Amino acid sequence: MSDRLQETSNIWITGASSGIGESVTRALARGGHRLVITGRRQGALEELASAAPDRIIPAAADTTSKEDLQTIAGTLENHGDLNMVILNAGTCEYLETAHYNSDVIEKNIHTNVIGTARCLDIALPALRRSRAKGQPATLVIVSSSAWWFP
Protein backbone atom coordinates (compact mmCIF):
# COMPACT_ATOMS: atom_id res chain seq x y z
CA MET A 1 0.00 0.00 0.00
CA SER A 2 1.15 3.53 -0.66
CA ASP A 3 3.31 5.30 1.92
CA ARG A 4 0.58 7.94 1.98
CA LEU A 5 -1.74 5.38 3.55
CA GLN A 6 0.47 4.05 6.33
CA GLU A 7 -1.30 6.17 8.94
CA THR A 8 -5.04 6.17 9.49
CA SER A 9 -6.54 8.75 7.14
CA ASN A 10 -9.87 10.49 6.58
CA ILE A 11 -10.86 9.70 3.00
CA TRP A 12 -13.79 10.66 0.75
CA ILE A 13 -14.58 8.19 -2.05
CA THR A 14 -17.13 8.94 -4.78
CA GLY A 15 -18.68 6.20 -6.88
CA ALA A 16 -18.21 3.84 -3.94
CA SER A 17 -21.33 1.73 -4.40
CA SER A 18 -19.93 -0.51 -7.15
CA GLY A 19 -16.95 -1.42 -9.29
CA ILE A 20 -13.61 0.23 -8.62
CA GLY A 21 -15.05 2.44 -5.89
CA GLU A 22 -16.46 -0.53 -4.01
CA SER A 23 -13.15 -2.40 -4.22
CA VAL A 24 -11.18 0.64 -3.06
CA THR A 25 -13.63 1.15 -0.19
CA ARG A 26 -13.23 -2.45 0.97
CA ALA A 27 -9.42 -2.26 0.83
CA LEU A 28 -9.23 1.05 2.69
CA ALA A 29 -11.71 -0.15 5.32
CA ARG A 30 -9.51 -3.21 5.93
CA GLY A 31 -6.62 -0.78 6.37
CA GLY A 32 -8.44 0.93 9.24
CA HIS A 33 -9.12 4.23 7.49
CA ARG A 34 -12.09 6.50 8.24
CA LEU A 35 -14.23 6.85 5.13
CA VAL A 36 -17.07 8.93 3.79
CA ILE A 37 -18.41 6.96 0.85
CA THR A 38 -20.78 8.42 -1.70
CA GLY A 39 -22.71 7.05 -4.62
CA ARG A 40 -26.25 7.06 -5.93
CA ARG A 41 -27.37 3.78 -4.32
CA GLN A 42 -27.86 4.23 -0.56
CA GLY A 43 -28.55 0.52 0.02
CA ALA A 44 -25.25 -0.56 -1.51
CA LEU A 45 -23.40 2.12 0.47
CA GLU A 46 -25.01 0.99 3.73
CA GLU A 47 -24.04 -2.60 3.01
CA LEU A 48 -20.42 -1.52 2.52
CA ALA A 49 -20.52 0.56 5.69
CA SER A 50 -21.75 -2.41 7.72
CA ALA A 51 -18.22 -3.85 7.53
CA ALA A 52 -16.95 -1.03 9.78
CA PRO A 53 -19.89 1.15 10.89
CA ASP A 54 -17.73 3.10 13.33
CA ARG A 55 -15.38 4.18 10.53
CA ILE A 56 -17.50 4.33 7.36
CA ILE A 57 -20.17 6.96 6.75
CA PRO A 58 -22.45 6.15 3.78
CA ALA A 59 -24.07 9.15 2.10
CA ALA A 60 -26.09 8.86 -1.09
CA ALA A 61 -25.24 11.63 -3.53
CA ASP A 62 -25.22 12.29 -7.24
CA THR A 63 -22.06 14.19 -8.16
CA THR A 64 -23.98 16.10 -10.81
CA SER A 65 -26.32 17.55 -8.17
CA LYS A 66 -25.18 20.77 -6.50
CA GLU A 67 -27.71 20.18 -3.72
CA ASP A 68 -26.41 16.67 -3.00
CA LEU A 69 -22.85 17.95 -2.94
CA GLN A 70 -23.74 20.74 -0.51
CA THR A 71 -25.05 18.07 1.85
CA ILE A 72 -21.89 16.01 1.38
CA ALA A 73 -19.75 19.07 2.11
CA GLY A 74 -21.44 19.30 5.51
CA THR A 75 -20.91 15.59 6.16
CA LEU A 76 -17.23 15.91 5.27
CA GLU A 77 -16.85 18.97 7.49
CA ASN A 78 -18.13 16.94 10.46
CA HIS A 79 -15.86 14.00 9.61
CA GLY A 80 -12.61 15.81 10.33
CA ASP A 81 -9.75 16.98 8.16
CA LEU A 82 -9.63 15.22 4.79
CA ASN A 83 -6.34 13.52 3.98
CA MET A 84 -7.36 11.96 0.69
CA VAL A 85 -10.11 12.33 -1.88
CA ILE A 86 -10.74 9.65 -4.48
CA LEU A 87 -13.04 10.99 -7.19
CA ASN A 88 -14.16 7.82 -8.87
CA ALA A 89 -17.80 8.44 -9.82
CA GLY A 90 -18.46 8.06 -13.50
CA THR A 91 -20.54 6.49 -16.20
CA CYS A 92 -19.82 4.71 -19.44
CA GLU A 93 -22.67 4.48 -21.90
CA TYR A 94 -21.59 3.27 -25.29
CA LEU A 95 -22.91 4.99 -28.38
CA GLU A 96 -23.98 3.00 -31.39
CA THR A 97 -23.63 5.09 -34.53
CA ALA A 98 -26.70 3.37 -35.99
CA HIS A 99 -28.72 4.77 -33.07
CA TYR A 100 -26.88 8.05 -32.52
CA ASN A 101 -28.25 10.20 -29.72
CA SER A 102 -26.36 13.24 -28.49
CA ASP A 103 -28.06 12.86 -25.09
CA VAL A 104 -25.74 9.92 -24.41
CA ILE A 105 -22.70 12.13 -24.97
CA GLU A 106 -24.20 14.87 -22.82
CA LYS A 107 -24.87 12.45 -19.94
CA ASN A 108 -21.33 11.05 -20.11
CA ILE A 109 -19.76 14.51 -20.10
CA HIS A 110 -22.08 15.81 -17.39
CA THR A 111 -21.26 12.90 -15.08
CA ASN A 112 -17.61 12.31 -15.89
CA VAL A 113 -16.44 15.90 -16.34
CA ILE A 114 -18.91 18.28 -14.69
CA GLY A 115 -19.56 15.94 -11.74
CA THR A 116 -15.84 15.64 -11.08
CA ALA A 117 -15.37 19.41 -11.37
CA ARG A 118 -18.15 20.00 -8.84
CA CYS A 119 -16.54 17.55 -6.43
CA LEU A 120 -13.29 19.48 -6.80
CA ASP A 121 -15.13 22.57 -5.52
CA ILE A 122 -15.41 20.71 -2.21
CA ALA A 123 -12.26 18.60 -2.28
CA LEU A 124 -9.58 21.15 -3.10
CA PRO A 125 -10.33 23.64 -0.28
CA ALA A 126 -10.59 20.77 2.22
CA LEU A 127 -7.28 19.26 1.10
CA ARG A 128 -5.60 22.68 1.17
CA ARG A 129 -6.75 23.16 4.78
CA SER A 130 -5.25 19.80 5.72
CA ARG A 131 -2.00 20.60 3.93
CA ALA A 132 -1.81 23.97 5.72
CA LYS A 133 -1.97 22.06 9.03
CA GLY A 134 0.95 19.88 7.95
CA GLN A 135 -1.26 16.86 7.30
CA PRO A 136 -1.17 14.61 4.25
CA ALA A 137 -3.47 15.76 1.45
CA THR A 138 -3.83 13.63 -1.67
CA LEU A 139 -6.21 13.88 -4.62
CA VAL A 140 -6.90 10.88 -6.86
CA ILE A 141 -9.12 11.15 -9.94
CA VAL A 142 -10.20 7.95 -11.66
CA SER A 143 -11.38 8.37 -15.24
CA SER A 144 -11.73 6.56 -18.52
CA SER A 145 -11.93 7.42 -22.16
CA ALA A 146 -13.35 4.00 -23.02
CA TRP A 147 -16.79 5.35 -23.82
CA TRP A 148 -15.36 7.23 -26.81
CA PHE A 149 -14.64 3.97 -28.61
CA PRO A 150 -17.38 2.05 -30.46
Image (cartoon, helix red, strand yellow):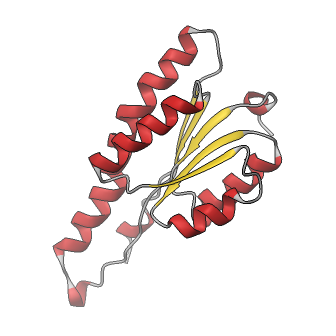
Residue in the picture at 27% in, 57% down = 110
* Above/below status of 128 relative to 26: above
The quadrant in which residue 33 appears is: top right
Rendered position, 109 above or below 121: below
Q: Which image quadrant: the C terminus?
A: bottom left
Q: Is residue 18 visible?
A: no
Expressed as whole percent of the image width and height from the top left, the position of residue 124 reads 43, 27
Which is nearer the eye, 131 or 35? 35
User: x and y percent of residue 57 in the render?
Assistant: 61, 48
**Res. 5 visible in picture:** yes
Asked if 84 appears above or below 71 in the picture, the reply is above
Image point (30%, 84%), residue name: 96
Give the quarter of the image for residue 44: bottom right
Instruction: Indicate the position of residue 9 as horizontal and vertical percent values.
Output: 70, 31
Q: Percent x, y for residue 72?
A: 43, 42
Please tell me which residue is depicted at 69% across the width and 39% down the height of the picture: 34
